[in-house]
């Protein structure tokens, strides 16, 4: 019997239908990442699974019990489903330890000593045992999210639901939360994760769902969804989130706008600060040393920059193509400092395309 079985699940608000007849089966130990554009029903789906939202129609069967049926003991069912929100939802006036103890005592009927022992165990699991007596406002965003995960785990759920667990975090704090989720996957925890963090989805998922307009538009293994999606909208979405493109002929030569666009893309991919800096430095040196001199001599010349991950190991490359001119900007000599920076941050790899240079960025 499946751990979770959803049939014909729909949700309607006033004039809006965020979910349209969802069918989904989840087996024990599966890790399912749910991706797609904002506003396509991903979070609503999670909230219906634990009845934070009441479905308009359909069934949600957890461990053999339909939580949409009248008379269902929702408190009992919710004990089987852990939920981690993007906003942590910790009680600010209670210590970290108390935040984990209280739900166990209130919902599971544990004694304080039992709940305390479990809280310490789960804090140790997420690497925060030493912060048990701190208050939430003394912790970083990443630490607060790890506490929220420990609180959910202390209830010993059969399924964990994560609603964009890294979206409220600074990029420097994302890794610590992703590592905790990776360890849970390795331990065999059944999880459904709504996320914009594609690296995480690729690494730990057994299945990826792409949602659009309230429906499961396409689903498959991470390899199928990210490397060879079958449907047009999935391909367009994956391409948009895995590559950055800027053409100076189409988008202009505003350097600040270019850098801002590149930074936004890097942040959306949850790149580390080190990786982001490398991308920016490679871009700046290529633009300033190869193309600015060309632009000054030829106002019809342009350049196209493409940053993308390629291959099984997500090799990060920046392809640079000269546009609107027959001149090869990469034939020009540049000063030793710029050459040294590029050498330290990237390796130029062969390209058989005219007036094109490809740089593999060192990570």
Image: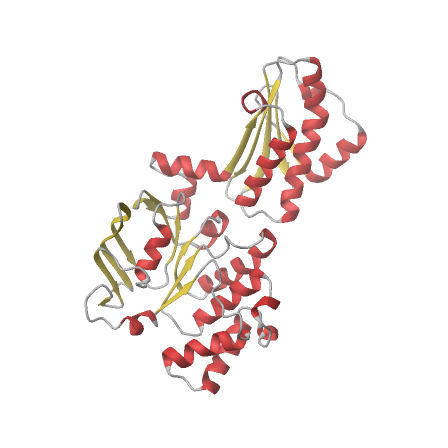
Q: Based on the displayed image, in which of its 4 quarters is residue 44 positioned?
A: bottom left
Query: Which residue is found at the position 27% from the left and 47% from the top?
Result: 17
Q: Based on the displayed image, in which of its 4 quarters is residue 53 positioned?
A: bottom left
Residue 323 image point, x, y percent: 58, 18
Instruction: Note whether 115 is above or below 77 in the view shown.
Output: below
Instruction: Note whether 24 is above or below 308 in the view shown.
Output: below
Scheme by which the image is coloured: secondary structure
Count of numbered tags: 0
In the image: residue 149, left or right of residue 296: left
The N terminus, quarter of image: bottom left
78 vs 314, nearest the viewer:
78
Query: Which residue is found at the position 60% from the left and 62% from the top?
Result: 140
The C terminus, quarter of image: top right
Residue 309 image point, x, y percent: 53, 39
Instruction: Note whether 211 is above or below 79 in the view shown.
Output: above
Taking the view exactly as shown, the residue that stands out farthest to the right is 336
Residue 103 image point, x, y percent: 42, 76
In the image: residue 192, left or right of residue 283: left
Residue 108 image point, x, y percent: 37, 80
Taking the view exactly as shown, the residue that stands out farthest to the left is 70
Query: Which residue is found at the position 49% from the left and 68% from the top?
Result: 90
In the image: residue 82, left or right of residue 356: left
Query: Which residue is found at the position 61% from the left and 74% from the top?
Result: 130
Residue 106 seen: yes
Residue 27 seen: no
């Amino acid at each position: 019997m499946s751990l979770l079985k959803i049939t014909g699940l729909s949700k309607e608000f006033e004039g809006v239908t965020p979910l349209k007849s969802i069918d989904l089966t989840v087996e024990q130990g599966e890790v399912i990442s749910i991706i797609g554009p904002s506003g396509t029903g991903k979070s609503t789906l999670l909230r219906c699974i634990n009845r934070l939202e009441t479905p308009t129609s359909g069934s949600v069967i957890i461990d053999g019990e339909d939580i949409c049926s009248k008379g269902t003991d929702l408190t009992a069912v919710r004990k089987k489903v852990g939920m981690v929100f993007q906003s942590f939802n910790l009680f600010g006036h209670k210590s970290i330890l108390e935040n984990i103890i209280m739900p166990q005592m209130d919902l599971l009927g544990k004694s304080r000593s039992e709940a305390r022992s479990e809280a310490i165990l789960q804090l140790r699991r997420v690497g925060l045992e030493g912060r048990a007596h701190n208050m939430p406002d003394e912790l970083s965003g990443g630490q607060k999210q790890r506490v929220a995960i420990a609180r959910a785990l202390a209830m010993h759920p059969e399924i964990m639901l994560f609603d964009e667990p890294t979206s409220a975090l600074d990029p420097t704090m994302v890794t610590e939360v992703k590592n905790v989720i990776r360890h849970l996957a390795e331990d065999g925890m059944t999880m459904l994760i709504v996320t914009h963090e594609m690296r995480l989805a690729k690494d730990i998922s057994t299945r990826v769902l792409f949602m659009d307009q309230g429906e499961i538009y396409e689903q498959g293994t991470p390899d199928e969804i990210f490397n060879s999606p079958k449907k047009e909208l999935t391909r367009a979405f994956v391409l948009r989130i895995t590559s950055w493109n800027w053409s100076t002929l189409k988008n202009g030569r505003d350097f600040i706008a270019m850098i801002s666009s590149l930074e936004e893309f890097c942040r959306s991919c949850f790149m580390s600060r080190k990786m982001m800096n490398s991308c920016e430095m490679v871009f700046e040196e290529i633009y300033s040393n190869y193309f600015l001199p060309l632009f000054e001599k030829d106002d019809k010349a342009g350049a196209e920059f493409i940053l993308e991950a390629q291959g099984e190991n997500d090799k990060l490359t920046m392809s640079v193509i000269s546009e609107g001119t027959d001149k090869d900007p990469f034939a020009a000599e540049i000063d030793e400092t710029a050459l040294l920076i590029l050498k330290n941050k990237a390796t130029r790899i062969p390209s058989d395309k005219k007036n094109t240079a490809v740089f593999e960025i060192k990570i």
